[in-house]
Image (spheres, rainbow, N blue to C red):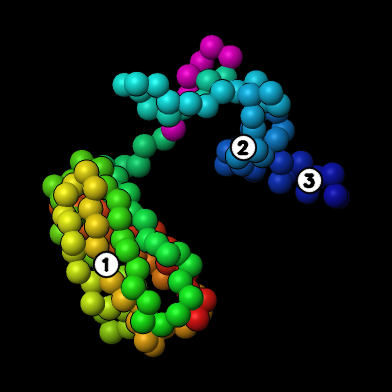
């Protein structure tokens, strides 16, 4: 019974890409242990070389290519100011930032867009005074492209 469970878990992990070709977790593979090499070159995207085959990193679907980061993350106190940065991934520029799942209890308040440049946007916001410990989403709208990240709070 245990052998069947281990075999099933290993098969699902391999299918999901959690385990690489050498049986090592995909994030822990190095050139020496798995015979793979990861890198970027001018004019190409990052990928993994296995033998003579180049495997490109999957691209997000059209409409979801904006990249967003929040710092500091995790946050430690209510009322703390955070900075939202990123790029629009082909969008027209930063149009809006929404933090939380509903407008009645937002994660961030007083959100202001400092720089709306599609290649490098900057926004600032203040952690809500009613927030508790947990995780909340931060969405960006870049006019045709959107992005999301999670803000962790330890207050």
Residue reaching furthest to the top? 52
Is 113 left or right of 1, judged from the image as shown?
A: left
Residues rendered magenta in the picture: 51-57
Is 104 left or right of 45, judged from the image as shown?
A: left
Name the foreground residue: 13 vs 58: 58
Residue 88 x %, y %? 23, 47
Q: CA distance from mark 1 to mark 3?
A: 47 Å
Magenta stretch contains residue 58: no
Give neighbour class at mark 1: few <14, some 14-19, many 20+ (Cα, 10 Å). Answer: many
> Of callouts 1 and 3, which one flags the residue occurring earlier in the amino acid sequence?
3
**Picture layout, residue 18 above or below residue 69:** above
Question: Tag 2's secondary structure?
Answer: helix
Question: Tag 1's secondary structure?
Answer: strand
Residue on which the image places disc 1 = 124
Q: Is residue 96 visible?
A: no
The residue lying at 16 percent from left, 55 percent from top is: 116
> Of callouts 1 and 2, which one flags the residue occurring earlier in the amino acid sequence?
2
| Number of numbered discs visible in the structure rendering | 3
**Picture layout, residue 94 above or below residue 153:** above
Give neighbour class at mark 2: few <14, some 14-19, many 20+ (Cα, 10 Å). Answer: some
The dot on residue 6 is 3
Residue on which the image places disc 2 = 26
Name the foreground residue: 54 vs 122: 122
């Amino acid at each position: 019974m245990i052998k069947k469970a281990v075999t099933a878990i290993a098969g699902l992990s391999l299918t999901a890409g959690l385990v690489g070709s050498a049986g090592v977790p995909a994030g822990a593979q190095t050139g020496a242990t798995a015979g793979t090499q990861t890198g970027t070159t001018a004019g190409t995207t990052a990928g993994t070389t296995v033998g003579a085959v180049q495997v490109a990193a999957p691209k997000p679907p059209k409409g979801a290519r904006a990249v967003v980061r929040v710092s500091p993350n995790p946050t430690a106190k209510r009322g703390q100011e955070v900075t939202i940065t990123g790029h629009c991934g082909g969008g027209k520029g930063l149009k809006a930032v929404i933090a939380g799942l509903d407008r009645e209890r937002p994660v961030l308040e007083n959100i202001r867009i400092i720089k709306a440049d599609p290649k490098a946007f900057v926004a600032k916001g203040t952690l809500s005074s009613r927030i508790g410990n947990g995780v909340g989403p931060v969405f960006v709208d870049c006019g045709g492209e959107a992005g999301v990240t999670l803000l962790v709070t330890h207050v």
